[in-house]
Structure formats: structure tokens, C-alpha cells
Image (tube, rainbow, N blue to C red):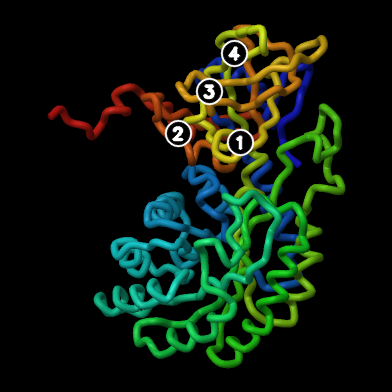
Amino acid sequence: MHSFRYQHDRLHCEGVDLNAIADAVGTPAYVYSAETIRNNFQRLDRALHEIDHTICYAVKANSNLAVLNLLAGEGAGFDIVSGGELFRVLKAGGEASRCTFAGVGKTREEIEFALREGVYCFNVESEAELAFIDEVAGSIGMVAPIAVRVNPDVDAGTHKYISTGKSQNKFGIGLDRAEEVYREAAQRKHLRIRGVQTHIGSQILDPRPFAEAVGKLIPLVEKLKAEYGIEFFSVGGGIGIVYDPALASGSPEWWSAVDHPRRITPEDYAAAVVPLLRPLGLRILLEPGRFLVGNAGVLLSSVLYVKQTPAKRFTIVDAAMNDLIRPALYEGYHEIHPLTAKPGEPVTTDVVGPVCESGDFFAQDREISALEKGDRVALLSAGAYGAVMSSTYNSRPLLPEVLVEGNNWKIVRQRQTYDDLIRGEVLS
């Protein structure tokens, strides 16, 4: 459920007409709904009320300071994968003691920074990393809290680029080797075993893979609790959202649908995993990102030209793959709707951007409203892996980001200028 809907034929975010934001800040631009983020967090929190838990928001999904501050205010912890993400959390009012630090390639500088700030735990992804964290902690006279990321070899049924829980993925340590790695960790003077972690992938719409992964790890978790007194079991993130209305209600007003058979809800997720987790008597951490912010954001764009060739129609907009790379990277789907509803029959078109790449498209052979030069559109479900993955390719400045709360809105990141593009560069 999210807070974007038509009112009197004009698309609104909460109580704000998106045309008004486009008038003020221009296009392209990102817009986020505070109400949607809060509602998603609170609904998931309520669904897990039967177990001791902490929701650690995956910062990589959307790292805007205003978004992080909003979630910190809701009581979220944070799942970070870099020193820069920890820096952002601290600047946004979060605490290192509520951060878990994941990622396969942590550097010495990042480990030292996290230790000095009091990070809650490092998720260890390899034996080599285990030894390195011990070395770094010892070099500054500290003890590093750790959890081993255990790979359960579960197929989450998601895109190969966002699958992380199979044996051929780069993440984690195999279940068959986990006990041995924990024994090694227990012998190292500068490590403290704090928990166990797993994560099987992203954009998962079926609760069964989550239950399968938890079930495979429970015997290990029980043994680690008995032997090392672990405090928590982190079950990772990956709860998916609906991008394609064909998977939702089938109605053009799909965002008004609350639930449907192929959308995973917090209640579905909890029903699958809570009965397995409750008997453990441990704190359960989970690391949602996309689920909290994905449907809370849109990318606003304006039509520059409409090009008709003998082969097809192209609708050329001012946003591009450098602003939202999901369609080019893994054929990610985003609904496209005009900011002002347009009557008439839809047309089949490619929606493309100005970047000089054939992969610069948002939709191909899609039926949408017949758009004309100057029309504005919203690309929905762009709150996760949108602005955070953007670049300045083709020397295109990064976009502004706007946060809406009720009837009010504010710019939470300014649009880059051309001077910003070259800041730090020098002539030879």
C-alpha cells in the first residue's frame, strides 16, 4: 500500500499535487512519501510482535539523510555495507550500536571506523575476513563483535543479480563449514561471537524460501547458542514489493489495492517464520530495504519529444538510465503514469531517455497513455535502488530529492549544478 493516487485527475503524493512539485523543482526529480515509509515500518513491526526483534533498515536501498532520520525516529536499526553508510546513519541521528555491518570487502579504514564508533556487529563473509577483522581489532586494542553470514544454499527464485543465498553466490560461508569457522572465531582474542546471520536475496514475493532458510539454520543456531551464548539470529532481508500491476489487482488503479494473492505481506512473512523463530529465545534481526521504501518513491519526468518510426513509437523523456538504472541493469519494471490523467485509448511505445546507450529505456513496447511533448509522468516504485544507484554518466547532474509529509513537502537533496559535476577535478 502506498500514498500515490489521483485526485481530480491529478496525481498526488499524500496531500500534495505532484505537478506543484514539478513546477517548483523541475524534472527529473525524486519524490518520497513519509507516510508510506512509516506505515510500512509499523506494519512489519506489528506483524513480528510475538518475538523479540529489531528491524535493521538496509541503507543501500535509499540512503538519503531525511529517510534515515525518519526511520531512526521509528526505532529502526540499520544494516550497512560501507563506512560511508555508517557515516550517513550517524549524521542522520542513528546510532552505531544499532548497526550491523555487512559486505564481502570491508577495508581496514572501515573496520576501524566502525569499531571506534561502537558498531553492534560485523557480519563476516569469509574466513579471510574473519582473520582480518581480528587483526584490525587487535591493532587498535579493541574486540570486534561478529556474526558469521551462513549461506543456506536456498534458491529464492529471484533475478540472478539479486540472489545471494546459493552456494555459487559470492556471499557468506557454506552451512557445511559454519561450525568450523565459529570454532576458529572463538579462539581469536580480538573477536567476540555475538550472533549468526543469513540472507538469501532480494525482491522475494513468496514466504516459503524465507521459512526454508530459517529451518535449515535452526539446528546450527541452537548449537551456537548452547556453545557460545549468542544473542541474536539475523534472518536478513529480501521481502519484495509489487512493481508490475499484472501481478497486483489488474486494475489501472492498482496502487489502491491493499492485498492480493501474489503480493507478500508482513503478515504472510511473519506467519512463515515466527513459529520457527519463537522457540529459539533469541533476538531476531531482519534487514528490509526495498519493502520499506520502494513503493514510497516516484521519479518525475517530462516528455521531450515523441518520435514515430516505421517500426515503432518512442516517447523520449528527460530522465535517463543514469537517474534510474534498474530497467537497464536487470530489466526492472516501473509503472509509468501521467501526472495529469489523459483520456483516450493507450498507445504502444518505448519510453526512453537521452543518454547515448541503447539500454537507456524505462519501458519497451508498453501500453501507456498517449503522451505528448511537455506532458509529465511519474515512474512509480522508484524509492529503492533509484537515486542511490544514480550516476553522472554523460555529465548529467544528480537529481533533487523531495520528501512529502501530509500537505507539506521539502527538498531533502538539492539538484547538482554543472559546477558540482567538476568539483574536485583539476586541469593537467
Marks 4 and 3, how far apart at CA: 9 Å
Residue type at mark 3: give it: Ala
Residue type at mark 4: give it: Val
Viewer-nearest of discs 4 and 2: 4
Q: In the visual, does 111 lie left or right of 298?
A: left
Dot 4 alpha-carbon crowd within 10 angstroms: few under 14, some 14 to 19, many 20 or more: many
Residue 319 bears which disc, if any? 3
Q: In the visual, does 230 lie left or right of 204?
A: left
How far across and down, in percent of the image, does residue 264 sit? 78, 52
Residue 160 bears which disc, if any? none
Res 277 quadrant in image? bottom right
Tell me the element at label 4. Answer: strand
> Above or below — where is 279 with respect to 314?
below
Q: Earlier in the sequence, mark 1 or mark 3?
A: 3
> Circle 1 sits on which residue?
382
- Which quarter of the rendering shows the N terminus? top right
Q: Earlier in the sequence, mark 2 or mark 3?
A: 3
Residue type at mark 1: give it: Ala
In the image, 402 versus 30, the foreground residue is 30
